[in-house]
Image: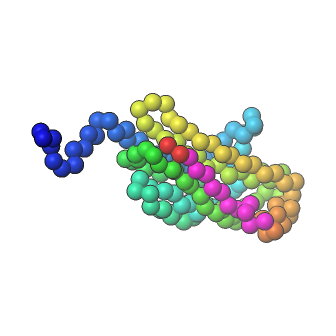
């Protein structure tokens, strides 16, 4: 047998990607430009290239991190919770967006997953009541498979 021994890796066939996790400050949702509520901070957890979860506390938008050397198959996941400073919330017309974004960057076009959700309230009081009654309002989660 003239076959070679050992792990004959052929890196040329293996595509390597990077994945960018972002919290946007503003984004267009249904044709309307919305921005993150003032005084909001985000706790973020995301999956790195080794599949480990990395946690970052109390960041403000815009925020991003790029993970290099990602190999397919890979499931990118970004999730977390939002805290807010009550004194900075406007009194009326509250738009509460969650603007997490995952982008895979490889040889071709970037593969993007946008999952923007926007909630609206007429008054600050209604927003505060909703946030207390429904803690999931202050959570976000997004996944994207490579």
Q: Quadrant of the N terminus?
A: top left
Instruction: Identify the residue at image location x=37%, y=41%.
Output: 16
| Name of the residue lying farthest toward the left | 2
141 within the magenta span: yes
Instruction: Identify the residue at image location x=51%, y=50%.
Output: 75
Residue 12 position (above or below residue 34) = above
User: What sort of colour scheme is used for the picture?
Assistant: rainbow
Residue 70 position (above or below residue 141) = above
| Name of the residue lying farthest toward the bottom | 132
Q: In front here: 41 or 49?
A: 49
| Name of the residue lying farthest toward the top | 108
Q: Where is residue 86 in the image (x, y as percent from the top left)?
A: 74, 66
Q: In front here: 81 or 89?
A: 81
Q: Is residue 117 visible?
A: yes
Instruction: Identify the residue at image location x=48%, y=56%.
Output: 47
Q: Position of residue 137 (x, y in %)?
A: 74, 60
Q: How many labels does the image show?
A: 0
Q: Position of residue 39 (x, y in %)?
A: 67, 60
Q: Can residue 86 be seen in this view?
A: no
Magenta residues (range): 134-144
| Name of the residue lying farthest toward the front | 1
Q: In front here: 33 or 118?
A: 118
Lateral position of residue 140 relative to residue 45, left or right? right
73 within the magenta span: no
Lateral position of residue 80 relative to residue 121, left or right? left
| Residue 112: quarter of image | top right
Instruction: Identify the residue at image location x=74%, y=53%.
Output: 96
Q: Position of residue 19 (x, y in %)?
A: 47, 45
Lateral position of residue 41 relative to residue 50, left or right? right
| Residue 141: quarter of image | bottom right
């Amino acid at each position: 047998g003239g076959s070679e021994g050992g792990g004959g890796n052929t890196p040329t066939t293996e595509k390597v990607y990077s994945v960018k996790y972002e919290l946007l400050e503003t984004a267009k949702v249904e044709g309307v430009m919305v921005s993150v509520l003032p005084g909001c901070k985000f706790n973020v957890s995301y999956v790195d290239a080794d599949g480990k979860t990395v946690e970052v506390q109390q960041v403000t938008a815009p925020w991003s991190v790029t993970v290099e050397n990602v190999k397919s198959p890979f499931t990118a996941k970004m999730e977390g919770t939002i805290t807010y400073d009550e004194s900075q919330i406007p009194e009326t017309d509250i738009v509460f967006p969650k603007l997490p974004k995952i982008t895979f960057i490889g040889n071709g076009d970037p593969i993007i997953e946008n999952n923007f959700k926007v909630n609206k309230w007429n008054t600050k009081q209604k927003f505060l009541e909703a946030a207390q009654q429904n803690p999931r309002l202050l959570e976000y989660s997004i996944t994207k498979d490579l």
